[in-house]
Image: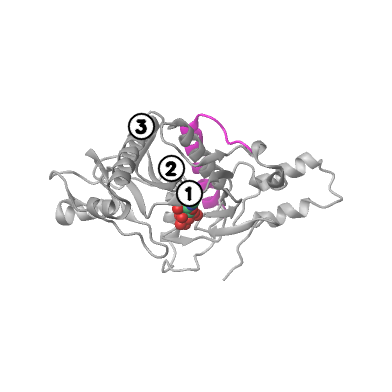
């Protein structure tokens, strides 16, 4: 297998003691380096997910989004520049906007990080300090449009995750009512859809009712907000946890990774709209003779650049500003 090119290698070569760059310029280079993985001396990593690396800070967690990208459930060998910062800062934006739901963010602002973390400039922009919580064993999925697995099930049985819908809805059409379709949170393998009754059985009536109400309200407000900025949020996944008996909104939220974002100008009822961010990656991978099992093949530079631009564009459209720490 060809070795994945890692932009970090070139950049490290510029960071020699003889470098004529100022310290400030060198730090700017370190911050802009895309990363596939990270480790920090003295910090205990407690989890490495598909995208995030999580470190234990005692009462809090350090939640670091790398620039890894996955497609067809495989992590690809190339990092996507700025992706981690986009995920972290879009999440921070929404958490703040929907402050009516208690959330896990302590700070996403690097200059507020404790001194021992500010030694690591690559954390800037891509990481947040969050309150440790006990994640609920369910994922809160909300659907506003009929697409993907929902569309398949509807065609076969007239239902989505077991919930009956009126007949005659077309692919990618907006649903008459927002659906809450919870799933299990599998430690390995695929999450499985569960019924509302099963969800209540797992987390209890009170918690189930609250997270459903929160999920639907946040989704509908975010959808209306994004629609004015050229992005359709077709569906999304939220996670909640418990901390001192209180429900806390955790994880990432309303990012291109946790949601289906569609470019509004390419949307048409009756066809599956392109994915806002990953379309060129998927299109490229479909041209290869790859069986969709690991290891995934490397991506060409133009696909990487286009994908990075799409993440940045989603960030700009939603937040109305440029990325911090870049
Ligand atoms: N505040 C929190 N406290 C404890 N666990 C959290 C918190 N926020 C998110 N998590 C957990 O951290 C993990 C996020 O890592 P991620 O890279 O997204 O993994 P995955 O590939 O499983 O999505 C999820 O399992 C999520 O439940
Ligand atoms: Mg995740």
In the rendered structure, the answer to whether residue 274 lies left or right of residue 175 reads right
Measured as percent of width and height from the top left, residue 104 is found at 49, 42
Residue beneath disc 2: 248
The residue at 41%/31% (across/down) is 100
Measured as percent of width and height from the top left, residue 274 is found at 37, 46
Q: Quadrant of the C terminus?
A: top right
Measured as percent of width and height from the top left, residue 34 is found at 62, 50
Residue beneath disc 1: 133
What is the distance, in whole Å, between disc 3 and disc 1 at their CAs?
A: 25 Å
What is the distance, in whole Å, between disc 1 and disc 2 at their CAs?
A: 8 Å
Residue, far right: 18
| Residue stretch rendered in magenta on the structure | 301-326
Within-10-Å neighbours for mark 3: few <14, some 14–19, many 20+:
few
In the rendered structure, does residue 232 fall within the stretch colored magenta?
Answer: no
The residue at 36%/36% (across/down) is 218
Q: Secondary structure at mark 3?
A: helix
Q: Is mark 2 within 8 Å of ligand 1?
A: yes
Q: Is mark 3 within 8 Å of ligand 1?
A: no
Q: Quadrant of the N terminus?
A: bottom right
In this rendered view, identify the residue nearer to me: 309 or 111. 111
What is the distance, in whole Å, between disc 3 and disc 2 at their CAs?
A: 19 Å
Q: Secondary structure at mark 1?
A: loop
Residue, far bottom: 1
Determine whether 15 is above or below 221 in the image.
Answer: below
Would you say the residues marked 1 and 2 are in contact, meaning their CB atoms lie under 8 Å apart? yes
Give the mark nearer the N terminus: 3 vs 2.
3
């Amino acid at each position: 297998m060809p070795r994945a090119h890692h932009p970090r290698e070139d950049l490290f070569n510029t960071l020699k003691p003889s470098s004529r760059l100022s310290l400030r310029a060198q730090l700017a280079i370190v911050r802009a380096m895309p990363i596939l993985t990270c480790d920090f001396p003295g910090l205990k990593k407690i989890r490495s997910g598909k995208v995030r690396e999580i470190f234990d800070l005692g009462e809090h967690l350090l939640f670091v989004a790398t620039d890894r990208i996955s497609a067809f459930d495989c992590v690809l060998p190339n990092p996507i520049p700025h992706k981690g910062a986009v995920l972290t800062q879009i999440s921070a934006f929404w958490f703040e906007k929907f402050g009516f739901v208690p959330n896990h963010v302590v700070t996403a602002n690097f200059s507020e990080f404790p001194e021992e973390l500010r030694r690591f400039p690559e954390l800037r922009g891509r990481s947040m300090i969050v309150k440790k919580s006990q994640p609920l064993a369910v994922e809160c999925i909300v659907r506003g449009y009929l697409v993907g697995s929902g569309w398949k099930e509807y065609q076969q049985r007239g239902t989505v995750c077991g919930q009956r819908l009126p007949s005659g809805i077309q692919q990618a059409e907006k649903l008459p009512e927002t659906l809450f379709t919870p799933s299990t949170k599998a430690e390995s393998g695929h999450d499985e859809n569960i019924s509302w009754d099963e969800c209540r059985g797992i987390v209890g009536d009170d918690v189930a009712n609250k997270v459903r109400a929160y999920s639907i309200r946040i989704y509908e407000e975010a959808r209306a907000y994004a629609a004015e900025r050229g992005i359709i949020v077709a569906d999304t996944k939220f996670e909640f946890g418990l901390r001192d008996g209180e429900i806390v909104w955790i994880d990432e939220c309303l990012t291109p990774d946790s949601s289906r974002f569609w470019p509004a100008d390419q949307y048409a009822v009756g066809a599956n709209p392109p994915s806002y961010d990953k379309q060129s990656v998927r299109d490229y991978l479909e041209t290869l003779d790859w069986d969709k099992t690991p290891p995934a093949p490397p991506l060409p530079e133009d696909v990487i650049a286009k994908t990075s631009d799409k993440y940045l564009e989603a960030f700009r459209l939603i937040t109305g500003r440029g990325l911090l720490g870049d």
